[in-house]
Amino acid sequence: DVKVTQSSRYLVKRTGEKVFLECVQDMDHENMFWYRQDPGLGLRLIYFSYDVKMKEKGDIPEGYSVSREKKERFSLILESASTNQTSMYLCASSLAGPNNQPQHFGDGTRLSIL
Amino acid sequence: QKEVEQDPGPLSVPEGAIVSLNCTYSNSAFQYFMWYRQYSRKGPELLMYTYSSGNKEDGRFTAQVDKSSKYISLFIRDSQPSDSATYLCAMSVTGGFKTIFGAGTRLFVKA
């Protein structure tokens, strides 16, 4: 079974702090993704990566950056946290290939910015 | 108009009922269709994954895709209280990285 592990289940930070969310997958997947999930808005893609050191913006990248130094690890960085970034953050991974492979998710990090 | 529309519910049914969950979409290029189940305070878990049109069955779950109507369904037979969760539909185009998710339907199965 695919295992996607997010480092924290719950996190409370203050406005203006730099926040790091970490994600590790153990199935050698090429693709990794960061989403935020908000009531009524569903999952919105922040960034994704299809290879080490490669990244692409998703639908809502403003205020975020990412880092992928190793294949199994994908980090999301909030450069200067703001209250509107309070949300559930979900990391996912998938295999690459000609047939779109489904994404597998971690259990999420519920982030509160005070 | 959103690319994928899904009724948020909540949908409440008695134990043992047949549940029908649905999504409509606007992009005729979608070829891959998925259903995820998400329990409270957990991440989405892949339930069903299908390519193009047709039906796929897995135990009590059946996924149906009707590309001509741009409509997908998930049927749950003999529903159980443990099926109470939010169900997300998702879809993608061939060769694309992005998966588009519905907002989810919240299901309650009462014992």
Image (cartoon, rainbow, N blue to C red):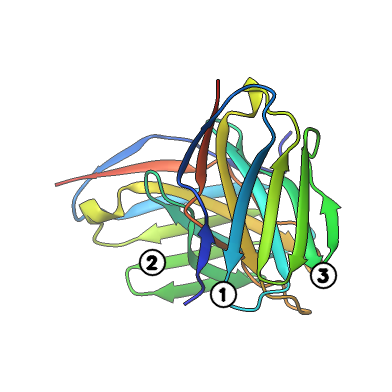
Are dots 2 and 1 in contact, CB under 8 Å? Answer: no
- Relative depth, front residue between A11 and B83: A11
Foreground tag (2 vs 1): 1
Q: Residues within 10 Å of mark 2 (few under 14, many from 20)?
A: some
Left or right position of B66 against B16? right
Residue A13 x/y as whole percent = 56, 29
Residue at image mark 3: B95
Q: Residue at x 59, y 78 (%)?
A: A27
Residue B36 x/y as whole percent = 49, 57
Q: Secondary structure at mark 3?
A: loop
Q: Residue at x 79, y 79 (%)?
A: A98
Residue A4 x/y as whole percent = 53, 64
Foreground tag (2 vs 3): 3
Q: Which mark is residue B98?
A: none
Q: Are marks 2 and 1 on the same chain?
A: no
Q: Chain of mark 1?
A: A
Q: Secondary structure at mark 1?
A: loop
Which kind of residue does numbered mark 1 sit on?
A: Asp
Q: Please tell me whether residue A71 is drawn above or below residue B10 in the rendered image.
A: below
Q: Are marks 1 and 3 on the same chain?
A: no
In which image quadrant can residue B96 be found?
Answer: bottom right
Q: Which residue, as the protein is rendered here, is positioned at the far left?
A: B111
Rounded to the nearest angstrom, the CA distance separating label 2 from label 3 is: 27 Å
Residue at image mark 1: A26
Q: Secondary structure at mark 2?
A: strand
- Relative depth, front residue between A67 and B52: A67
Q: Chain of mark 3?
A: B
Residue at image mark 2: B61
